[in-house]
Image (tube, helix red, strand yellow):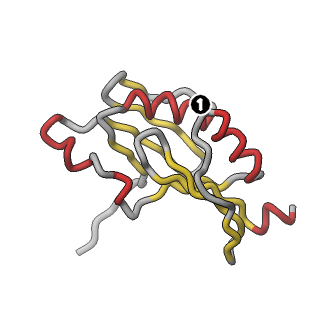
Amino acid sequence: MTFRYREAFVTLASAHIELLVQFYSQLLTQAPNPYIPNVYAEFQLPGLRLGLFKPKQNYQQEFENSTQSGMSLCLEVDDLEEAIAHLSYLGYSPPGEIITASHGREIYAYDPVGNRLILHQGHDIMAG
């Protein structure tokens, strides 16, 4: 037996949803749509929908320790240094150095509630 799905998207949960809405609005330079204050916000990215939500009170503890999650939000960028500068301007400088990997260059960063971000610039972008 198989099931059908229409699409997939990533969601991040936090009791501090408005802090995340402000951060991702500035990082992605767009307003969320749809947006229900203190409940849900969604950003439309090329090839991805990013949803932010505030978990119900009885589920909040399940989502509190997101820094221990294996999940990362990876954003492929055209210019890694420019992306790092933008993130630093927002007050969230990446704590480490740029890593050179087989697939390109990347750096780890964190949003205001500790969700891991990976800013990645692929070899094809660097050559172009």
Q: Looking at this view, name the residue that lies furthest to the left.
A: 58
Q: Which quarter of the rendering shows the C terminus?
A: bottom right
Q: Quadrant of residue 38?
A: top left
* x 76%, y 45%: residue: 82
Name which quarter of the figure residue 93 lies in. Answer: top right
- 88 relative to 40 in the view: left or right: right
Q: Is residue 54 left or right of residue 85?
A: left
The quadrant of the picture occupied by the N terminus is bottom left
**Residue 100 picture location, percent across and down:** 70, 70
Q: x%, y% of residue 34?
A: 43, 28
Q: Quadrant of residue 122?
A: bottom right
Q: Position of residue 53 (x, y in %)?
A: 33, 37
Nearer to me, 52 or 99: 99
Horizontal placement of 6 versus 43: left or right? left
Q: Residue at x 46, y 44 (%)?
A: 50
Amino acid type at circle 1 is Gln
**On the image, numbered disc 1 is attached to which residue?**
26
The reply, left or right, for residue 94 in relation to residue 17 is right
As drawn, the residue found furthest toward the bottom would be 102
26 and 46: which is toward the camera: 26
In this view, the residue in front, 87 or 7, is 87
Outermost residue to the top? 37
Nearer to me, 77 or 105: 105
Mark 1, Cα crowd under 10 Å, few <14 / some 14-19 / many 20+, is some
Residue 58 at what x, y percent from top left? Answer: 12, 39
